[in-house]
Amino acid sequence: MSALREKIPHPSADAIDLPTVMRTLGDPSRLEIVRLLADGRARGCGDISGLVGLPASTCSYHLRLLREAGITRTRAAGTQRLISLRRDDLEQRFPGLVDVLTQSGR
């Protein structure tokens, strides 16, 4: 039963849709989160919220939208949720997109 509670839904790689990805990344906070995760390290919500300067509840909302769009993967690790960029899936669907998105625009 606990295994069922740990199941965090993600869209399949085939279901990742470019208009949804682009609309989701149109928010500067979500784009900043993606750029942070581009180094390949999985991070917890608390770490991400501190690094991007967002309250935990706001960060959690943005992370949910990123996951639902297929941009990030969230996995349970005990009581913590670790978030990582779905770079391989995104690269397979839209070659070169992650590199363009993660270039610093500042």
Image (spheres, rainbow, N blue to C red):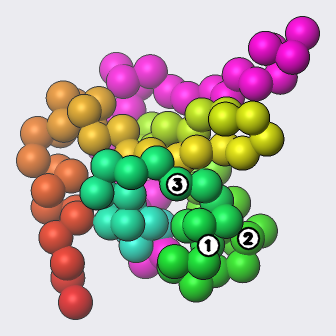
* Residue segment shown in magenta: 1-29
Disc 1: which residue: 49
* Quarter holding residue 57: bottom right
x and y percent of residue 69 in the render? 48, 43
Disc 2: which residue: 56
Question: Comparing marks 1 and 3, which lies closer to the viewer?
Answer: 3
Residue 20 shows up from this direction? no
Assess whether mark 2 and mark 1 are in contact (beta carbons under 8 angstroms).
yes
Q: Residue placed farthest to the right in the image? A: 1
- The three-letter code of the residue at mark 3 reads Arg
Q: Residues within 10 Å of mark 1 (few under 14, many from 20)?
A: some
- The three-letter code of the residue at mark 1 reads Ser
- The three-letter code of the residue at mark 2 reads Ala
Q: Earlier in the sequence, mark 1 or mark 3?
A: 3
Q: Mark 1 falls on what kind of element? A: helix
* Quarter holding residue 82: top right
Indicate whether 75 appears above or below 27. Answer: above
Q: Residue at x 36, y 39 (%)?
A: 86
Q: Earlier in the sequence, mark 1 or mark 2?
A: 1
Q: Residues within 10 Å of mark 2 (few under 14, many from 20)?
A: some
Q: Nearer the viewer, residue 26 or 34?
A: 34
Q: Residue at x 53, y 47 (%)?
A: 83
Q: Residue at x 50, y 38 (%)?
A: 73
Q: CA distance from mark 1 to mark 3?
A: 10 Å
